Image: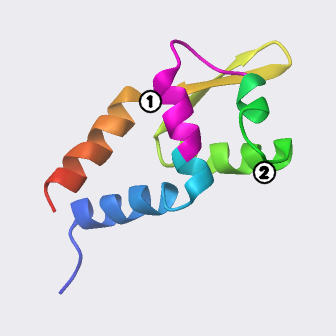
Amino acid sequence: MTPSPADEELAALAWAVAHPARVRILRILIATDGCVCGELVDSLPLAQSTVSQHLKILKDAGLVQGEVDGPKVCYCVNPAGLARLKKLIAAV
């Protein structure tokens, strides 16, 4: 049986949130009005490079979006990506 496109999409999104640090990042972004820049690293017991790697995975999955603000990138949750994850999980 070949997986459906929705199954493949859910698997990719589930993998993106399969790490506790990425779940924590999403929770922080959801609880924040607007975008978060350097404060995100300060909120986690992880190196800046590790946080950046986790953000890249979340961004590639469409759960997070980033915008360049001078030399920094500010991140916020992507409402459409989060809604899609919720919809796919609800359909399981």
Residue 74 lies in the magenta-colored region: no
The residue where tag 2 is placed is 50
Callout 1 secondary element? loop
Of the two numbered discs 2 and 1 on the same chain, state the one appearing first in sequence: 2
Q: Which residue appears at 22% of the width and 81% of the height?
A: 2
What amino acid type should be assigned to the residue bearing mark 2?
Thr
User: How far is mark 2 from mark 1, CA to CA?
Assistant: 21 Å
Q: Which residue appears at 46% of the width and 27% of the height?
A: 30
Residue 25 image offset from top left, x and y in percent: 59, 40
Between marks 2 and 1 in the image, the one whose residue lies nearer the viewer: 2
What amino acid type should be assigned to the residue bearing mark 1?
Asn
Q: Which residue appears at 56% of the width and 60% of the height?
A: 19
Residue 51 image offset from top left, x and y in percent: 74, 44
Tell me: residue 9, above or below residue 85: below
Q: In the displayed structure, does residue 25 sit left or right of residue 44?
A: left
The residue where tag 1 is placed is 78
The quarter in which the C terminus is drawn is bottom left
Whether residue 77 is visible, yes or no, is: no
- Magenta segment: 24-37
Among the 4 quarters of the image, the one containing residue 12 = bottom left
Question: Could you say which disc has been placed on residue 28 in the image?
Answer: none
